[in-house]
Image (tube, helix red, strand yellow):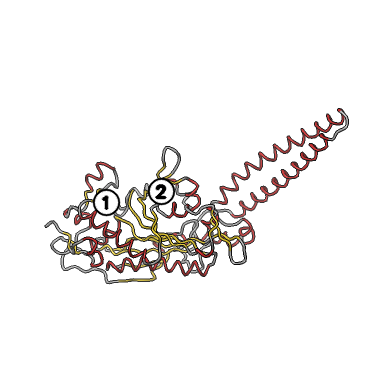
Amino acid sequence: MLDIRFIRENKDLVAVAAKKKRIDFDVEALLKLDDDRRSFMAEAEKLRAEQNAANSKIASAKTDGERAGLIGDMKTVKASLESAENKLKEILKEWQDMMLRVPNIPDISVPDGNSDADNKEIKVWGERTAFGFEPKDHIELMTKLGMADFERGAKVHGFRGYYITGDGVNLCFAIWNHALDFYSKKGFIPVMPPTIVRKVYLYGTGYLPGGEEDLYTTQDGDYLEGTAEVPVMGMHSDEVLPQSELPKRYLGFAPSYRREAGAHGKDVRGLIRVNEFYKFEQVILCEASHETSVKLHEELNRNIEEFIESMGIPYHTVANCGGDLGLGQVKKYDVELWVPKEGKYREIGSASYFHDFQCRRLNIRYKDADGKMRYCHSLNSTAIPTPRILVSLVENFQQADGTIKVPEVLVKYLGKDVISNR
């Protein structure tokens, strides 16, 4: 959420931001609504003052006639006040809804574009895996090796259902343990947060309004989180943090849930797009400094790149265009892994920064060296998702005999260097 004063002083910048993000937002309509809000607030305040003055006069009236006249005048003021307050309540509701839809300002370095097809490649790492045989896809490989069961998964869960079994489970645990060691050495505090969260935290992180169709809800009106970012950010809502503790680095680990609504015809087979999964998520809260946010954003993105490199999986990194940014994101990178059978890169994680967009909504603050209260800046990035990582891993490390060579860094966790039926 942006400050209304900032929006008023930079309305052209906000309009350009909406255009660059391909978001339909009328900043002039918001400012007109804000004028109405301020006008009715002033009117209501004036009428309250008149009502208080009338009450004082009634209390000090010397005759019944004088008191009756003052009571009559007060009833007129009271009716006018109720009307103004009701109108203000309606305007506030509309104003708050529009304020939640104001897009954050993208960084000047964000490329222009309509969708992920317009994202700009900025880095390529590793050679695309070449085989002396016809490679198999992850579905066939994992099924034959007893690592996954998609048929029974669909039977029990339905569309996009899966079971991870046998060495598929063991490989996931190996990746999780490697991730825990890897990110802990970089100063991240591991957190296992609640996965059922109140609606306010989806609004706070910017997933609402606008993301309703992709969220699972409970019968109590709460939500199943789609990323540990949401409950980890909620952890410090309505708190004032000591500046000396910034930046705070958290590594959230949680089961996550996405309905994948609107993606019915996309990636209908395998583990690319599923409804439930496990994910490590990097979250940072830092001081209100653009330079610090930029530096930490590069750090977060480099962390996931290094993690992928440690397993030897080819990837490239792209800078997301304006049309592929979320409402609150200032800038975002996607890291995409090479998938040999498809002959294309597939997203494995994203790194984003938000300035104070999320912390303003969640009221996460700190007191700076001058004693001034300021909103923190927030950043997040995927650390690693499972089972999606298995797609690229098993396809890139498959052998001619159908076995999977285990990346060297995972051998100590898995206890073997080859996954096979033998």
Measured as percent of width and height from the top left, residue 158 is found at 28, 43
Q: Quadrant of the C terminus?
A: bottom left
Q: Which residue is mark 1?
A: 269
Q: Is residue 212 left or right of residue 91?
A: left
Farthest residue in the top direction?
Answer: 64
Query: Is label 2 or label 1 in front?
Result: 2
Q: Quick one: 6 or 75, which is closer to the camera?
A: 75
Measured as percent of width and height from the top left, residue 148 is found at 22, 51
Question: Distance between the Cα atoms at labels 2 and 1?
Answer: 30 Å
Disc 1 secondary structure class: loop
Disc 2 secondary structure class: loop
Callout 1 amino acid: Arg
Relative vertical location of residue 388 with respect to residue 64 in this rendering, above or below: below
Q: Is residue 420 left or right of residue 408?
A: left
Dot 1: within a 10 Å radius of its alpha carbon, few (fewer than 14), some, or many (20 or more) residues?
some
Relative vertical location of residue 51 with respect to residue 352 in this rendering, above or below: above
Relative vertical location of residue 339 with respect to residue 223 in this rendering, above or below: below
Measured as percent of width and height from the top left, residue 161 is found at 28, 46
Callout 2 amino acid: Pro
Measured as percent of width and height from the top left, residue 67 is found at 84, 31
Total count of labels: 2
